Amino acid sequence: MVRVRSNLVEERLEILRSGVESLLVQGRLTADKPFKKTQREALQALRKYLGDESIPAEERLVGYIEIPTGIGKTGLFVSLLSHCQRIADKMGVDFPALIMVSRVDLIDQTIDSMKEYAPGLLENVGQYYFKKKELDKPILLTTYDSWMQLTENGTLKPGDFAMQIPDEAHRVLAVRRQERAAEHRTNGTIDIAFTATGKYDPERTLDHTHKRRIYFKPIKQAVYDGELAEYIETQFFVIRLKPERDKSGKEKFFSGAESERRKQKAWTQTMVNAFVSGVDAMTGEPLTDHQAAFFAGNTHHADITAAALNANPALQAIARKKGCKGVAVAIHTNGINSSRQIELMKAFKRGEYLAVVGDEKFKEGFDHPPLKNIFDYQRGSYVDKAQIIGRASRKFFDPHKNRFVGAVVCDSIIYEGSDDKAEDEWREKKARLNAITAESILEDAVILRKRYVPLIPPPKRPKGTPTVIHLDGVEVEAFCSLEQIKHYVNETRKLRVAAQEGKLHPEGLISLSDEQRDAFGKLLESTGNLGPTRILYLMTQERPALCFDYSELSRLVYGGGILIHPYRFGELCKVLEAYAAALPPEMLQDRFIPFTDDMKREFRELRIARGNPHKDVIYEAAVAWAKKNKKVLADNFGVSTGIMQGKQQTVRQSAWQAIIQGVTSLPVTKPNATADHVLVPYTPEMKRELAKLAKSRGDIGSARLYRMLKEFEAARTELRPVEADVDNVRNLIDPKRIERMKSVYKDVFERAVQTLRAAEEVKKEDAKVVPITPAMYQELQRLMERAGIHGGRTLRQTVESYEQARRLEPSGVSDGLMQSYIQQRYDTTKKSRWKRVIAALKAAA
C-alpha cells in the first residue's frame, strides 16, 4: 500500500473542512437560493464527519452522501467545490479537481448548474468526451467511460487531482472501475461521492468503494419534509398472459425472446389503457392532466409503445385539446443520434407531447418537474427503480390547479399464466419475488404523502389479485374503486369548505393547554381508554380527509408534546364523544392490567400444549369465544407480537380473558418443537453448521435463503410456517451480523437448516470461482445472437424462464450481473452460475 504524506493529507483535509464551514456560514447556495433542509443536513453531517478524530485523517477524505433525486445534489457539490477552490487559492495551494458523470448529456446539465451556483468556476472547467478533449484546465468534467479510457492509457495518473467527485456514484461499482478508483485514491485524494442510490444490487454497494456513508435520506423522508412532490402514489398491476395450447391440446411453454415479446405486448396494451382511463387516487383527477414517461424494456419495445400511444383516439383528442404536436415521442439510444435526442427532449419539455417513451435514456439526470406520471416495465434493479421514481418526484407547482401536485408511479409484474391453478399461483409468486417495485423503494407505502397536509389518505387495497390482463382483452381493476374515489373527493371538498370558512389554516397550529389535556384524558377514559391504533381506525372511517397518522395520535394519547390545529383537534374530540356515547356500560369497567410473569408463563404453557399455534389462529379462537359468550370487546385487542413474545407490559382485561379462553378451546396436541418461537443461544457449532450448508448450496446469501425458506414452507402444507422475516434470517447468515449474534429463534434456525438440506447441493467443482476466458465470452455472444437476446434484462429473464420450466433452484442472477457479462466487465465468475446462463441460452436458441 502506498504511504501518503501526512502533511498533504492534513492540508487537503483542512481545505475541505474550511470549504464546508464557509458554505455553512454563507447560509445559502446563492443569494436567491437558500439551502434546502436536506442540503443543510448533508453539509452539517459532512462537517461532523471531517472533525471525527476517531477516524484516521486519510480515511476522512473518503465517503459518500446518499440523497434522493430532485433535492439538488449537483448544486450542492458544485457550490462545495467552488468554496474549496477559494480556500485553496487563499492558501496558495493548487487544487485540481475531477467531476465524473454517467452520461454525456449530464455534462451539459452540470455546466448549467455551475452557471447558476458557481459561475466563477466555468473558466477553469475543461470537458472531455467524444466532442471535446480539454485536459489543460484545473477542473476536469468527464464521463465514467472517458475517465476509464484516460486512466487505462496513462493520461490520468494517481495523484493528478486533489479532489474527485463521482456523481451518481453507483456507476463506479463495476469491478474494473472499482479497481481503478482505488488506485487513484492512494495519494491523499479527496473522494466525496454523491448518489441517489448507494446500492447497485445486494452484492455491490458504495460501502465497498467509499467505506462510510456520511449522510443518508430516503425518498420517504424527503417527501415528509416537503422537499419533493406533494405525495408519491403507487399503482400496481399484475399482468397474466393467457395460456395457449398446441394442436394436441397441451399448454405451450414460451421462453426467452418469444416470451419477452408477449410480455411487452401485454404491458404496452395495459399501460396505454391505464394512461387513458386512469385516475390519481388522491384527487380523483385523470392521469392525462400531467405529462407521463413510459420506461420500456428495450428500444424496440419503446418504439412499439410510442406507436400504440399515438394510435389511441382518446389520447389523440386529449393531445389536440392541450395543443400538443402529438401524443408520444420515443427517445432512446438506438438509431437516434445525440443532437436529435436533445432536440426531442426539448420538444417534450416545451409541452409538445403528452408522453415520452424511452429505455435507458431517462433513468438518470432527466430533470423535468411537470413530469408526474411514470409507467415502468417490470424491473429487477434497485438502482433503476429508484432513479425512475426520481424522474417524477420533483416538487412542482401547477399554475392551472394553483397547488403543488403529486406523482403517480404505475408498476407491474408479468407472467405466463397456466390453466393449472397451482402452477399459475407458483408462476405469479416467482414473478413477485423477482420484481423490484416502487413500494420496495418507498418502504411499502401505497401512497406516501407529506405529513399533516390535508390530503386524501390512501384507499385500502382489495384482497386477492388486483388486476388481470389477457392478451385477447383488457380487464383492468385498479386498487381503488370509483366509489372509494368519490368518497375521498367528497371528504376533500368538506375540508376545503372548512378552510374557506377560516376553520383551517396551515400555520394556525397550537400547543394544548393543561386544561385541554385533562379534558382529553377524561374523554379517553369515557371511551374505555382507546389506544392510538383504534383511534386512527375511527378517524380514517369518520374523517378521512383530516389525515391523522399513528405518531401524531400516539403523542396525543400518551401526553407527548405536539402542535395541532384547533379544528382538527375539535373534530377528533367529536368523533371520540360519539364513540363514547354509543359504548355499552360494561365496557367502561374494562381496564388495562399489568402483564405479569405468571400470566406470561400461563399463556406460554397453554400455547405449547396446543402445538404452538400461530397468532392468527389464537386471534380467531379468541374472537369466536367472545362471540359465543356475547362478550363486548373494547377495540381490536389482537394477539400482538408483543404478547406472543412476552414483551407486553399491560393488557386489557377483556382481551386477556378472550385470549386465554380462546387458547384453552383449541385441541391439545403434541408440541411442535420446530414451531417453538423462543430465543436460544446461537452457538459456534450452530453457526458453523449453517455456514457449511449455505456454502455447499452455492454460497447462499440471506435474501435468497429467506425466499427459499418461504418456498420450502409453501410447498409443504403439513408444516406450520415459522414466524420468520428477512431480518431473522439475516441474523443467521449475514457475515456482518453473525459474529455479534448471541441468540436466535430456535424454530427459524431449524427451518433454515431444513430448507438448506432439502436444496440441491452444488458440486464443489461448480462452486469454484473460475476465470472468464475470451473463448467463454465469445460463446456467450454467439448464443445470444442465435437466441435474439440483446440486453441484460432479457438475458436475466431467459435464465429465470429456464429455471422455472425445469423447477431448478434460482441461481440469483440480476439485470446488472447479466449486463456485466454482456459488456465483458468481469474477469472471474462462479462456475455454476456461468453454466446455468449458457444452458439457458442453448435452450432458448
Image (tube, helix red, strand yellow):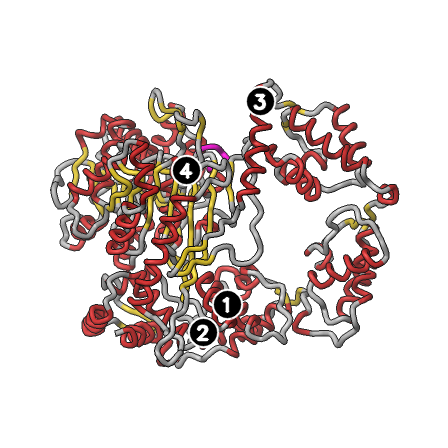
Residue 440 at x, y percent in the picture: 47, 52
Asked if residue 659 lies left or right of residue 700, the reply is right
Circle number at residue 499 = 3
Residue appearing at x 82%, y 66% in the figure:
664
Q: Which residue is mark 2?
A: 695
Residue 44 in view (yes/no): yes
Residue sticking out furthest to the top: 502
Of pointers 1 and 3, the one earlier in the residue sequence: 1
Residue indicated by mark 1 = 425
Q: Are marks 3 and 2 in contact (CB under 8 Å)?
A: no
Q: Specify the principal SS of the magenta part.
A: loop
Quarter of the view holding residue 297:
bottom left
Query: On the image, which quarter does residue 745 sit in?
Result: bottom right
Specify the amino acid type for callout 1.
Answer: Glu
Q: Is residue 12 magenta?
A: no
**Residue tagged 4:** 46
Residues at marks 1 and 4 touching, judged by CB atoms closer than 8 Å? no
Magenta stretch bounds:
223-227
> Measured along the vertical axis of the image, is residue 224 above or below residue 596?
above
Task: Give me the C-alpha separation between circle 2 and circle 4.
Answer: 39 Å
Which x, y percent locates residue 244? 38, 71
Query: Disc 3 residue type?
Result: Ala
